[in-house]
Image (cartoon, rainbow, N blue to C red):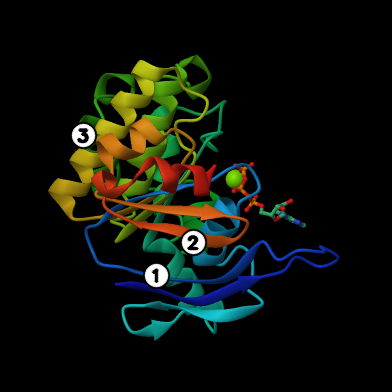
């Protein structure tokens, strides 16, 4: 369970707060789409949850424990329970697909092994299994630079799967994909959500995709939650408040 409690974030020198006392609770296994205009605070929210930025007020409680005091080993452990996917994929272009998936183990293995990309047979087996799940088993040895955008995002999803995450955070993971490919990637995320009960919290621009795939929509405008409910409860008026 992820509890966001009156979360506030004001960047240094900014005149307005990026997040203003945001509160909501996400149960394990929910598929949440976060909607909002550019600048609404969607990325800031995700960065607070994975501790890339420190909130200025409020708290984030993960399974009963505040994550804001985590440092060193506890922070590393917490981060390795979160899968991250981005609009820009964040893959190593010149390396193979399988190596990029193995990168998902880096948070969980000793530093020296990670530095030399020394992975065990079992880790390689799990990486291949993850590639199988995203439909890219036969692309294991191909360089990422030779893959399409949709395939790259699926590599990133496979990379997050080997972490055995409890939650996957997506910062507009389909924003640079065409509509068909976006639907395929969202379907894959839903399949993983349903099969593994991994919580999904995905920032999206596209209302249609949010309605089709999410079990819950959170709308943010100017750093505040203006809608929180089921996709079929989202009215035209709610949309006007969001956009
Ligand atoms: N590193 C930063 N330093 C200062 N201000 C920032 C920083 N990052 C974001 N902001 C500001 O915080 C507010 C929220 O930005 P954020 O990136 O979270 O929005 P977003 O909803 O993700 O937008 P987009 O859809 O464009 O990605 C904006 O006003 C933005 O200019
Ligand atoms: Mg953003």
- Give the answer, above or below, for where 111 lies relative to 1: above
Q: Which mark is residue 133?
A: 3
Which residue is found at the position 24% from the left and 65% from the top? 28
Task: Identify the element where label 3 is drawn.
Answer: helix
The mark that comes first in sequence, 1 or 3, is 1
Q: Is mark 3 within 8 Å of ligand 2?
A: no
Q: Position of residue 229 (x, y in %)?
A: 31, 56
Q: Tell me the tag on residue 225.
A: 2
Q: Residues within 10 Å of mark 2 (few under 14, many from 20)?
A: many
- Quick check: 217 above or below 56? above
Quarter of the N terminus within the rendering: bottom left
Q: Which residue is mark 1?
A: 24
* Camera-nearest residue between 233 and 53: 233
- CB contact under 8 Å: marks 2 and 3: no
Where is 105 relative to 10, above or below?
A: above
Between disc 2 and disc 3, whose residue precedes? 3
Cα distance in 3D space between marks 2 and 3? 35 Å
User: Percent position (x, y) of residue 162?
Assistant: 31, 49
| Extreme residue in the left direction | 195
Frontmost of labels 2 and 3 is 2
Q: Is residue 203 in view? A: no
């Amino acid at each position: 369970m992820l509890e966001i409690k009156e979360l506030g974030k004001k960047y240094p020198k900014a005149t307005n707060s990026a997040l203003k006392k945001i509160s909501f609770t996400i149960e394990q296994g929910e598929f949440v789409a976060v909607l909002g205009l550019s600048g609404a605070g969607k990325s800031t929210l995700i960065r607070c949850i994975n501790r890339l930025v420190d909130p200025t007020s409020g708290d984030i409680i993960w399974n009963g424990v505040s994550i804001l005091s985590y440092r060193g080993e506890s922070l590393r452990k917490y981060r390795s329970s979160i899968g991250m996917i981005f609009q820009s994929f964040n893959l190593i272009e010149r390396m193979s697909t399988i190596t990029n998936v193995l990168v998902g183990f880096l948070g969980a293995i000793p530093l020296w092994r990670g530095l030399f990309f020394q992975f065990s047979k079992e880790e390689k087996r799990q990486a291949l299994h993850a590639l199988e799940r995203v439909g890219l088993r036969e692309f294991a040895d191909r360089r990422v630079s030779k893959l399409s955008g949709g395939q790259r995002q699926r590599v990133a999803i496979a990379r997050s799967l080997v972490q055995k995450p409890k939650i996957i955070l997506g910062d507009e993971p389909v924003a640079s994909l065409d509509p068909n490919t976006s639907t395929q990637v969202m379907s894959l995320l839903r399949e993983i959500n349903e099969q593994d009960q991994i919580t999904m919290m995905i920032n999206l621009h596209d209302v249609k995709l949010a309605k089709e795939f999410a079990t819950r929509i959170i709308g943010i405008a100017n750093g505040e939650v203006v809608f929180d409910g089921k996709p079929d409860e989202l009215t035209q008026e709610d949309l006007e408040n969001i956009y």
